[in-house]
Image (cartoon, rainbow, N blue to C red):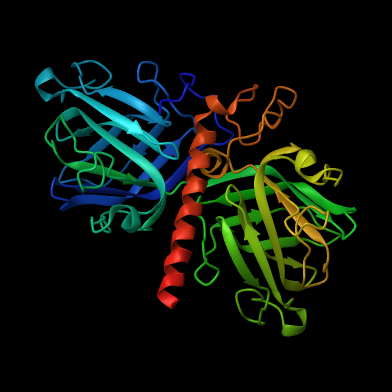
Amino acid sequence: MLLALGALSSPAHAAVSSSNNNFTMLDSGAGLTGGTNDVVFTWDGTLNTDPATAVVNATITSATPFFGHLWSAYNVKIYGPGTYTISTADTAGGPGCPDVPQPNCASGGNYTVAVPVGEIMGHMKFAWNGTEGIDVIDIWTPGSWTTLNGTNPIEKAGGGSYTGPVYSLVSTDWDKNGVAGGGMIDGPFSGFNANFNISAITSTTNNNFTMLDSGAGLTGGTNDVVFTWDGTLNTDPATAVVNATITSATPFFGHLWSAYNVKIYGPGTYTISTADTAGGPGCPDVPQPNCASGGNYTVAVPVGEIMGHMKFAWNGTEGIDVIDIWTPGSWTTLNGTNPIEKAGGGSYTGPVYSLVSTDWDKNGVAGGGMIDGPFSGFNANFNLNPGGVTTCLTCPPPSPDVVNATNPGNPGCSISQTSVSSSSRADWWLVAGFLAWLGIIRRRFLRNKTKSQT
């Protein structure tokens, strides 16, 4: 489906820059021919929607040679969902072949590429051993290389550190020939498939922390929270890994606090234990009397929303459990008359955020009541703007009142700061498809698990 979109989204809430990304080159028979893991990726978070007006909005670089020669990727253009005709025609002296004569300028026919909702496309030029203008097209989706690409091998050597197989952006077999990536049609690697797999870590500031008591009274908080996230989603507490950080320099009730072991989950139903032992990961630095430990949470995370589970340390107590369920929108729309912290450190940019903490335990107070530690019954809410690619990977389409010209100071998950409809936003549709996909995958996993137990 070709979405009716503008030529290019406005600058994103935050740019993306990450290292130790993966480059895997496969031949036409899915044989591994080389690659590396020192790829540096940057992206301004925008999405092109028309090759005729597309602009460079990302970079891909590496210091590791391929087959004995240094290579470069340039003119990297990232697109949202849609159907595109991509010309590989280049002329010596033009943007595709700026430094070589025509015989060394790769030039061929056209690609026709359909980018599904929930995925994005990267088109770039590739230069190697004196040839420029080699066209590479990847279609990316979040997930695991081994899940998405079966037995296709992935490069684990070269420079840098291999961090796969899970990436924020995994290259997929978009031309459906059984080989990950898309076969090149010009230059010395015709028929080969260049795959880039990207971990997109972003960091944003001026995020919100609001602590409410059991009666929805505001007890403190701040607006200087720094949030980072690698864009991945846990799906099982037994195997969950730390994939985000939340930090602040502002004390709470006279004492500095820290959030740690932050794990973000996709849709599903989870049992979260709050039990901790002194010396363990939940209480690494305090004796058992100062280690908050209690019962279990049972949490249902709807499709279209995500969950954060973290430990909280304050005034000599560690292991305090906090669970937020987030959805894009406005605090005042989602949480009614519940107050939000507008003071403390940093700058208040609400009430609209990409990730708003919601009343998931349905007691009329935003957040979920804590069940261990000195704040039992209190509700710790973090309201966040992930920015960059994580904005694209975590937000379902907004209601019309979420992004509008009356709140120009904080567009939340919107790339544009002006009023837009959901039908004209590639990033919203991308996110909606991703979270729906997660829900389908999880339901299929649970169904198969049930069958195996019967």
Q: Position of residue 134 (x, y in %)?
A: 20, 30
Q: Residue at x 52, y 47 (%)?
A: 435
Q: Quadrant of residue 81?
A: top left
Residue 321 visible from this viewpoint: yes
Left or right of residue 224: residue 336: right
Residue 346 place in picture, x, y as percent: 75, 42
Screen quadrant of the C terminus: bottom left
- Percent across and percent down for residue 388 are 53, 38
Foreground of the two, 14 or 368: 368
Q: Quadrant of residue 124?
A: top left
Residue extending furthest toward the left = 103
Instruction: Report whether 239 appears left or right of 26.
Output: right
Percent across and percent down for residue 393 are 51, 43
Q: Nearer the viewer, residue 262 or 275?
A: 275
In percent of the image, x 51 and y 56: which residue is there?
A: 233
Q: Where is 251 relative to 12, above or below? A: below
- Residue at screen point 79% across, 63% down: 369
Residue 377, compared with residue 399, is above or below; it is below
Instruction: Please identify the residue farthest to the front as the structure is shown.
Output: 454
254 or 370, which is in the foreground? 370
Q: Is residue 13 left or right of residue 294?
A: left
Please, is residue 204 above or below residue 361 in the view? above
Q: Name the image quarter holding the N terminus.
A: top left
